[in-house]
Image: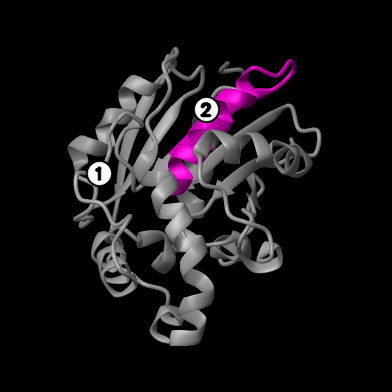
Amino acid sequence: MEPIPVLCFPFAGAGASAFRRCQEYPTDVLRICPVQLPGREERFDEPPHGDVQQAVADLLGEVMELIDGSPRVALFGHSLGAVLAYETAHQLTRLDGMTVGQLFVSGSPGPWTRRERRATGLTDDAFVARVREFAGYAHPALEHPELRDMLLPTLRADVAMHEDYLAPPGGPLAAPITSIRGNSDELVSAEQSAEWAAATSVRWQSIEVDGNHMYLVDSPAELVRLMARVLSEVPQCTA
């Protein structure tokens, strides 16, 4: 059987390279397929998205290229990436001949929960400090004034897109969902991670791993093994 493509959506401000280390751990079960959003890396000159629904619609062509004709696909998203993956999964389940075998949502409350404290609208210094507080992590480039000026527009757009998002009315996803959370995550509680149980009509499970909100930066091999194990256990026809 061919490896299952896993579409990987990054956290705010990050690009497809956030999953480069995951690609260093090949497996017969899955194929890591990072999704590149505009406003970063090779798409730096393109304006970033400001709305989740618009982003998903614009990314669909790239997504289909990454799937490359596979009849079965999985998706992974962390933080902002979780809601992008969730909305993309809804789009894919509507396509004839396409089965969404699994959605992995990581470091994220359910799609109907908004963060109480926001970073949007703050001054640059306060914004960077708030994002660091939220994530427990900040890209080293944000410490350099010139690089920070280049990166902030995309990071601000991503954060606003995430903070403004609420799942639109509609039925639950016709695919299984696995919620992943770092066991020392101070941004997303276990209860908030469990809110994803209501977002699927198939089945839901919760998995905690060692680490904080940005566990995937430190433990890419563990993340790949986790996804491979879950996908190995999923029946071939789930939608």
Element at label 2: loop
* Relative height, residue 94 to residue 124 (above, below): above
* Membership of 117 in magenta stretch: no
Contact (CB < 8 A) between labels 2 and 1? no
Which one is nearer the viewer's eye here, 16 or 178? Answer: 16
At horizontal 54% and vertical 63% (from top left) the residue drawn is 18
Percent coordinates x, y for residue 67 in the rendering: 73, 39
- Disc 2 packing (10 Å; few <14; some 14–19; many ≥20): few
Determine whether, in the image, residue 179 is placed left or right of residue 239. left
Residue 115: which disc? 1
Residue 206, picture quadrant: top left
Element at label 1: loop
Residue 11 visible? The answer is no
Which one is nearer the viewer's eye here, 2 or 217? Answer: 217
Instruction: Determine which residue is flagged by label 2.
Output: 234
Residue 119, picture quadrant: bottom left
Amino acid type shown at disc 1: Arg
Q: CA distance from mark 2 to mark 1?
A: 32 Å
Q: Which residues are magenta?
A: 78-104
* Relative height, residue 183 to residue 147 (above, below): above
* Relative height, residue 28 to residue 132 (above, below): above
* Membership of 102 in magenta stretch: yes
- Disc 1 packing (10 Å; few <14; some 14–19; many ≥20): few
**Of callouts 2 and 1, the N-terminal one:** 1
Percent coordinates x, y for residue 232 in the rendering: 54, 35
Determine whether, in the image, residue 78 is placed left or right of residue 184. right
